[in-house]
Image (cartoon, rainbow, N blue to C red):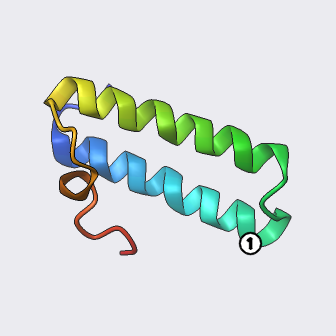
Amino acid sequence: MWTNRREFRKKIREKQREMYSLVKNKGLNDPDVYNKSCEIDCLIVEYMKRYNCFISTTLFNNYYN
């Protein structure tokens, strides 16, 4: 899977950008947007468990970049 925190966060941000693009093109109520959101949720939970990170601000310092 991912070898370090940086790669893990990079993957989460990549999935977020994919979701933003889906929202822009399909709207919030599209099933693809929901599925992508669920995928991101799973990644975040896995990250938090793996790195004992329970404060989201440390996970996404540059949330919109």
Query: Residue visible at 49% across and 37% down?
Result: 41
Residue holding disc 1: 24
Front residue of 1/61: it is 61
Front residue of 31/6: it is 31
In percent of width and height, residue 52 lies at 15, 30
Q: In this rendering, is residue 31 above or below 52?
A: below
Query: Residue visible at 66% across and 66% down?
Result: 21
Which residue, as the protein is rendered here, is positioned at the far front?
A: 55
Q: In this rendering, is residue 16 above or below 42?
A: below
**Looking at the figure, which quarter contains the N terminus?**
top left
In percent of width and height, residue 55 lies at 21, 47
Q: In this rendering, is residue 38 above or below 56?
A: above
In percent of width and height, residue 36 lies at 64, 43
Callout 1: SS: helix
Q: In this rendering, is residue 43 above or below 57?
A: above
Q: How many marks?
A: 1
Query: Residue visible at 38% across and 47% down?
Result: 11
Q: Quadrant of residue 27?
A: bottom right
Badge 1: few (under 14), some or many (20 or more) residues near its Cα, within 10 Å?
A: few
Q: In which quarter of the image is residue 63?
A: bottom left
Q: Is residue 36 shown left or right of residue 52?
A: right
Q: Is residue 63 shown left or right of residue 54?
A: right
In percent of width and height, residue 59 lies at 24, 51
Q: Which amino acid does label 1 sit on?
A: Lys
Query: Residue visible at 40% across and 48% down?
Result: 12
Q: Is residue 26 shown left or right of residue 4?
A: right
**Looking at the figure, which quarter contains the C terminus?**
bottom left
